[in-house]
Each structure stands twice: as structure tokens, then as C-alpha cells.
Image (cartoon, rainbow, N blue to C red):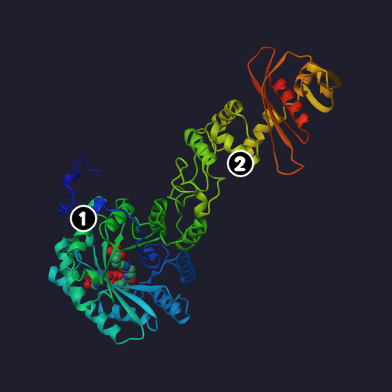
Amino acid sequence: MIADPAAKYRAFQPISLPDRQWPDAVLRSAPIWMSTDLRDGNQALIEPMDATRKLAMFEALVKIGFKEIEVAFPSASQTDFDFVRMLIEERRIPDDVTIEVLTPARDDLIRRSIDALAGARRAIVHLYNPIAPAWRRIVFDTDQQGVKDLALAGTRLIKQLTEARPETEWVFQYSPETFSATEVEFAREVCDAVSAVWQPTPQRKMIINLPATVEMSTPNTYADQIEWMHRNLARRDSIVLSVHPHNDRGTAVAAAELAVMAGADRVEGCLFGSGERTGNVDLVTLALNLYSQGVHPGLDFSDIDRVRQVAEHCTRLPVHPRHPYAGDLVFTAFSGSHQDAIKKGMAQQRDDQPWEVPYLPIDPADVGRGYDAVIRVNSQSGKGGMAYVLEQEHGFALPRRMQIEFARVIQRVTDDHGGEVTGSDLFGLFRREYLDATTPWRYLGHRLEERHGHGDDAVRIEVELEHAGTVRTVTGSGNGPLDALVHALALEVEIIDYHEHALAQGAAASAACYVELRVQGGAPRFGAGVDDNIVAAAIKAVLSGVNRAP
Ligand SMILES: CC(=O)SCCNC(=O)CCNC(=O)[C@H](O)C(C)(C)COP(=O)(O)OP(=O)(O)OC[C@H]1O[C@@H](n2cnc3c(N)ncnc32)[C@H](O)[C@@H]1OP(=O)(O)O
Ligand SMILES: CC(C)C(=O)C(=O)O
């Protein structure tokens, strides 16, 4: 990097729009979506999709609910041309879906593109040519009139060729490519000239697509450009105003949202932001952002993992694990305070109430994600996360103080070994720490006698134990089984707290017991026991606590 970037880079000059309206707009409905996965997405791949992959992507897009799909750049390759023919000839295009193809403003390429569409029920022909100053000078060695003439010649040829094929319902789309880098007055001049040739009507609209071919500045400047065009374009009532934001600055999603607030009717992009260089705007994120605000996007991402798998298969590009809504880790909290808040939020969330689980903008279940991955445990985790996983995956609902005690055990393990502790690791550690704490005292069996009218000795217990390898039977009485047990053990044990719950549903449910106790005035300790018999579970829990005492 150089010390003075201003010596090399110029700041983008925003347009002046002091009476801009878009900052007060609120998104209350979804725009028209157009997927360009099979064109912009495809042209950006190291290995473009073959016909099988293209078809898999097309079918996935249809299933998601896209009604406009740019399926190819037919003049670029035989694969693309043949793919369009296959869709049409094999009648693979549902009646409510319109396919689109892209063509440069060159006669031979336009003709080939229209040939590809022969026999389509309805089709969008998308013409583009770059019009920004640097492209005029560097790429085309021409002036404003030169690029305008190119756009007009292309439009005239498309009009002529499509009028000769009335069996297809034609929609015309024009993109002043590199719009984001173009003087807005000139972009309007070209678009107005193009629409004057095409002569759209409110009943037969054309699409004007204003791409941020290269994202030039902060998203508010793009929104200003779009609002200016929205307010100044001729024949606006006959035009579907579309945007096509690229992601060079990493702000394509924001740019698209602000552009729709600024008057755009339609958004072009790709699943997960595939597309040239840093990608096109990510339609999954855009759609689910709307959903999180209570606006149905009209696209179905109920099975987001399946959509991600298809996209990864077709593009051979991985979706980042932190990708909004779709990444493997986006509904997962490792950090203790987040886990604590999510656990509390999940416990309090009611189906008939607005979603309000802290840290989770949407319910993972709405996009087909389970809750099992919501909380995962590593060295950044606290008691809440550990307790959540142990309860969700193994059914043990530890009392709060026991969570704190067990979290220290887990912390030692994660500090020593690093990495994640899975649900089964957690259960293994729980078993080792509590359930397998069976020396020196091990429970073998018990008999219980309830004696009415004996006051504080209402329960008599006889417990068969193994102590340091020797089988012994001890007896004691008390006001309840635990009291009787403590007397039978003849140890100085104080029971501080006791919890129990069933571990599984039904009559054969086993019980889990947790006992907090103090042995010989020492520090409080927990013990845990599991058994089909609730008294046996409690005895095991007491013995576990006694055995764990130092
Ligand atoms: C921002 C975008 O994503 S726009 C879409 C871009 N997508 C693609 O380019 C993918 C498919 N493209 C291709 O397969 C090829 O580029 C083809 C088949 C279209 C053309 O191939 P070629 O004839 O070999 O030309 P090449 O790829 O070098 O294109 C550059 C030429 O096209 C001209 N050109 C570029 N864009 C356009 C346009 N929209 N309209 C007319 N001419 C154009 C350039 O000025 C250059 O002309 P020159 O050769 O006279 O200097
Ligand atoms: C053809 C146009 C819409 C394009 O892909 C772009 O400008 O990025």
C-alpha cells in the first residue's frame, strides 16, 4: 500500500440530491426478483456450469419461487445456447416463469440470442453496453454519442427481430452497463432514447436496469442515483426500474435495500452473492432480511440447507460458514453470555408471540434449521450453553448451582484441549464426573419401609452397598428416604438441596436426581444419580456427592 492513496485514487463524486426522499421510506413489500445465477453467476465461475448443473440450478430457482430467471448468455457458448433451446424444446419452463437472456449490442450476437429464444412463450431480451466515461475512453475509444448510438442500434435490431416473431411475448430490458460510474444526466439521456425507440406502454412495460457494475461508493450514493433516475426518467409509468448491485465494497445488500427504498421495482442478483468479482447482491440475504421485518419475500427458503447444497454443487464454490442466514454457524452461539441469553429466550418464547430470542434475528426453524446447532460449547462458553446442550441432547436439566460447578469441569477440559466439546463429549464428562463417581461407596440395592405414626422416623431404609470392595448393609430411619439414608451411612452429611426429573416420557421413564450436600462441614458438592426407581436415583445421587467430596 502507498503512503498517500489520494495520489493514486480519486474519491467518487456523489450527485447532489438535497431533497432526497428515500431515507424515510420503509420496505413493506418485496421487489420483483430476478436471478442471474445462470448468467452473471455462471460467467464468474472458474469452471462454468455444464448443462446438468445449469438444469439443477434452474430447477432449484423455480422451486424457490423466482418468476424471472436469466438463464444464459447464448452468444457466449454453445453450452449456453443449447441450454436455452433445451429449456424451450423440452418444455421445462413453468407458465408463470419468464426466462431472460443477455446480449451485447453487436448485430451477430443479438441475432444469435434471439435465435436461442425461438418458440419461447415469453422471454426477456436483455441488451447492455457500458456507457461510463472510463469505458467510453478506454474500452470503446468513443464519446457519449458513440455509446448512445450503440445502445440505439441494438434496441432497433431487437425490435425488428422480435416483431418478426410474434408467437413469443417479448419483454425488452436495457442496461446502461457501468451506470454507477456514469453521469446521471447522460444515463437518463441514453435510457430515454432507448425507451423512445422501444415505445413501452403501461400495459407492455420495458425494464430499465441500472447496474452498480462496479460498486463505486457508499450505498447512499447509489440510492441517490436511483432516486434521481426514478424521478427523471421519461415514460416512468411504462418502465420497470431494476437494479443490479455488485459487491465490490461489500455493501451490495445495503445498496439494493436503499435502492428499493429509492424507487427501484426489481432486483437482480444471485443466491449467496455469486457473480462477477466480489459477486452480485445476495438474494438470499435480501429476501430473509425482508422476512425478518415481517414482510414475506415471495421466495421460499424453508429448506435453506438444501438451497445451499444445490448452489455449492452447481457453482463448486463453498458458502461461508458465517454467511447470513445460511452458513453452518450463523445460528450458533459459542460465547457464554450469548448462550445464556439464547437459552433464556428459547425458554420464554411462545408460538403466539412475536419472535424475540436475543441474538437470533429469525427463528432457525423457519429456514429448516434445527435448534441443536444453536448453542455449541468451547472455551468461550459458559454454564448456560453447556446446560442447554446437555438438556437438549441428553435430557439432563441441571439445577443452576450445579451448572456452575459442572461448567468449571468443562472449562478445564476446553482450556487443556482447546476446540469444541460436543453434546456427547459433554455427556461423557457428566457421566465421568457424577454418575460414575461410585467409589468408595457404590449402591447395590435398597428396601424402604414407611411407618405411619413414627414422627421423625416415618421412613426406615435398608441399603445394600459396596464400600471399598466389601458388600455391606446399613440401616437407618428418618423423616424421608434421604434423611434415613444419611442416618444409615453414619457420616456427617448435610443435604442442602435436592432436584429430580424424569429423563424420558412414559411409564418406563427413568429419573435423574441431583443432590447438593456438604460432607463433614466441607464445601458444598453436587452428586447425581439415575435409576428407574426414584429412591434408588436419590441414593445414588447422595453417594455420588459423598464420593466426590475431597
Ligand atoms: C458487467 C457484465 O457482466 S456484462 C456481461 C459480460 N459477460 C461476458 O462477457 C460473458 C460472455 N462473453 C463472451 O463470451 C465474449 O466476450 C463474447 C462472445 C460476447 C464476445 O467475444 P469476442 O468477440 O471475442 O470479444 P471480446 O470478449 O474480446 O469482447 C470485447 C469486444 O466487445 C466490445 N464490447 C464489450 N461489451 C460490449 C457491448 N455490451 N456491446 C457491444 N460491444 C461490446 C468491446 O469493446 C470489444 O470490442 P473490440 O474487440 O472491438 O475492441
Ligand atoms: C449486464 C449488466 C446488467 C451487468 O451484469 C452489470 O453491469 O454488472
Question: Residue at position x 65%, y 21% from top?
Answer: 525
Q: Secondary structure at mark 1?
A: helix
Q: Is residue 510 left or right of residue 231?
A: right
Which one is earlier in the sequence, the residue at label 2 or at label 1? Answer: 1
Q: Secondary structure at mark 2?
A: helix
In this rendering, the answer to whether 259 lies above or below 98 is above
Q: Which residue in the protein does label 1 denote?
A: 224
**Rounded to the nearest whole Å, what is the CA distance between mark 2 and mark 1?**
49 Å
Closest to the observer: 162 or 310?
Answer: 162
Q: Which residue in the protein does label 2 denote?
A: 392
| Residue 469 seen from this side | no
| Residue 299 seen from this side | yes
> Quarter of the picture for ligand 1?
bottom left
**Looking at the rendering, in which quadrant would you find the N terminus?**
top left
**Looking at the rendering, in which quadrant would you find the C terminus?**
top right
Q: Position of residue 534 (x, y in %)?
A: 76, 32
